[in-house]
Image (cartoon, rainbow, N blue to C red):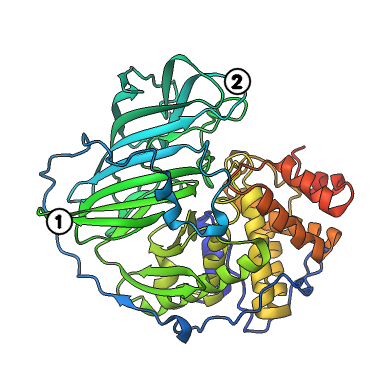
Amino acid sequence: MHCRTLITLLLCLQLIGCVPLPTPNPFRPSAATPTRGLSPEPRSLPSVTPTWTPSAIASPPATATPTETPTAEPTPMPAPTWTPTATAQPAASLDEWGIYALGLRAAMQPEPPWAGMTQYSLTLTLAPDLRQLDGRARIRYSNQEPTALNEIYLRLFPKVWNVGVAVWDVAVNGQAISPTFPANATLLRIPLDKPLPPAAAISFTMAFSATIPVGLGAGNFGEFALDREVLSLGHAYPTVVVYQGRWRLEWPALRGDVLHHDASLYDVRLHAPADLVVAATGTMVDRHDNDDGTVVWRFVGGPMRDFNVVASVRYRSITGQADDVTVTSYYLPGDEVNGRKALGWARDALRYFEGVFGPYPYRKLDVVAMPTPAGGLEYPGLIVISTRYYQDANADENTFESVVVHEVAHQWWYNVVGNDQVNHPWLDEALTQYSTYLYMRAKYGPEGARNFVDTVTNLRWGRVDFKEMPIGLPSGAYTGAEYSAIVYGRGALFFLALADRMGEARMVELVRRYYAAFAWRIAAPEDFKRLAEGVAGGRLDDLFEKWVNPR
C-alpha cells in the first residue's frame, strides 16, 4: 500500500491516538508542498545536541548485542474456576522509601526525596483466563495544599467506558468507613471524620475488582482489554484525583488521553499465570513461582504518572542498551525484524532527547507491540506501539519510526513534566510533535525536516481546511478530526513559529529549563508562557493569541 493511501485510510478511520500521522520517508526525495508561510528549512542544532550514530535498521548496533528470550506458544487457558485472592493485604511497608530508588537513575531522584508524593501499594490478581482482575490497594496521601481537606476523591476509570468495577472494604487509617459514589458514578468519595491539615498524611485501603473486556476493550484506545491474547491493564486501579485549588472532577473526554495525575510512587505485586511474559511500568525487583502454576511479580517505581501492565503468553523480547538504560522490545511471533527496528529507534530517540532536553529518569524502557486503534500510547518507562506497524508489510517505515520516537518523547513531556491532558492536551502532545521534528531533522537532515513540516501542515492541519482554531482548548471541545488536526498538526506549527521567533539556541534553552523547572510537577499553560517570555526576553502575547489561547 502506498504511503499516501495508508494516510488516507488512517484519516478515514479517524484513529486519533497519541501518535503522529505518517511522515513521508526522507530517504525518498519528494517535492515539498507549500507550508503556508512557515519555513521548513532546518537550522543547525546548538552544541547541546549529542553526537550520535543511528542504529542499524535490521538489528541493534554491535555494542548492544540483543538477546532474544523465547516464549512458549500459547496454550488454551482453563475455565475460570478459581478463588480470587484479592483479600490478601499488600505486603510492602509504605515506609520503605529506598525501594523506589531501584529503578531511578541518580540524576533524576527528586529532592527532597519522595516527601509529599502519593504512594500506591497494590496487589493485583488475574484469573487464569485473564478476564477478571481482583485487587487490593493501600494508598498513602499527603495534603500538599495550603488548606485542610475534608474528603478525598478517587477515579474509577473503567466506569468511564461502562465497565463494571466493584469497590468494598474501605478503611481510613484502619477504621472502616462508608464511601459514597457521586452522581456520575466514575468517582469514589472518601469522607474524613476530621479535616486533613496541610502537610499531614493519611492512609486508606480498599478491595476492588473489575471484569476485563475482551476485544477492543475499555479506554479511548483499548488500554484496558484482553485483545488477541494481549492483556493491558491501563486505568485498572482506583486513582487519586488531582487537587488544584479544588478536586478536578471533570468527566474525562472520550477522545485523546484521559490522564491528569500527580507523580506518585508505586509498589505492585502481580499474581498471574506463570506462562505470561510481562512488561510493566516500574522495575521488577522480585519474582516468586508458586506451586499452582502462578507467579508473583513485584514491580516498584516512581515518580511515575501511572501504572500499567501489558502481557501475553505469545511475546518474544529482544534487549539492547542506550548507555546505562536497558531497552527491551516486546513483539509477537513473526515480527522479529520490526521488533529489532523498534528497539533501535527507541535507543536513538533516548540518546538524542537526553542530549537536547535533559536526562531520562529510569534505568529501563520497554517498547511493547499491542493491538490498539491508536498508533501508540505512553506510560512511564513503557511505550505501546500498535501491532499494525509490525505486521503490515506495506506500512511506511518512516511512519513506524515517527510513532516510536513520538512515544519516547512523551517520557519527557507527560511523565516527568506533567500537565492536564484533558484540558490542555497541546502542552504535551504539540511539544512532543515538535520534539519528533527535532529528531527527524537531526537524523535525516533538510529532507526529513521538510517532510515533517509538510505532514503536520497539509496532512494534519489541512484535513480541517487549515481552520485557525486555538490549540489550547480542552480535548472535549474538538471533534475527532479537529483534535488530531489542531493539537497534533497546528500545535506542532506553533512550536516551530515559537522557535522562529526566539531563535534556535533560546528555544533549546527554553525546553531544557522547562524540563528542569517542572520535573515531577504539573505545568499549566501560563507556566510555559511565563518561562518562554523570560527566555525570549520579551512578551509573546501575539503568538499565544494567534495559536494557543481560546477565543
Residue 373 visible at all: no
* Residue shown at the point (84%, 59%) measured from the top left: 502
Q: Which mark is residue 346?
A: none
Left or right position of 517 against 479: right
Residue pointed to by mark 1: 77
The answer to whether the residue labelled 1 contacts the one labelled 2, judged by CB atoms less than 8 Å apart, is no
Task: Give the amino acid type for the residue marked by disc 1 in the picture.
Answer: Met
Looking at the rendered image, the quarter that the C terminus falls into is top right
Tell which of 303 and 327 is nearer to you: 303
Choose the circle earlier in sequence order: 1 or 2: 1
Tell which of 94 and 354 is nearer to you: 94
* Residue shown at the point (84%, 63%) measured from the top left: 503
- Work out whether 368 lies above or below 534: below
Residue pointed to by mark 2: 147
Between tags 1 and 2, which lies in front?
2
User: Where does the image place residue 528, in percent across and percent down from the top left?
Assistant: 73, 46
- Work out whether 429 lies above or below 351: above
User: Where does the image place residue 23, in percent across and percent down from the top left?
Assistant: 61, 70
* Secondary element type, mark 1: loop
Determine the image quadrant of residue 459.
Answer: bottom right
User: Where does the image place residue 198, in percent across and percent down from the top left?
Assistant: 56, 23
User: Where does the image place residue 479, in percent across and percent down from the top left?
Assistant: 60, 44
Residue sitting at the far top: 193
* Residue shown at the point (71%, 67%) measured from the top left: 453
- Work out whether 159 lies above or below 195: below
Residue 389 visible at all: yes
Determine the image quadrant of residue 230.
Answer: bottom left
Residue sitting at the far right: 538
Task: Give the amino acid type for the residue marked by disc 2 in the picture.
Answer: Thr
Label tally: 2
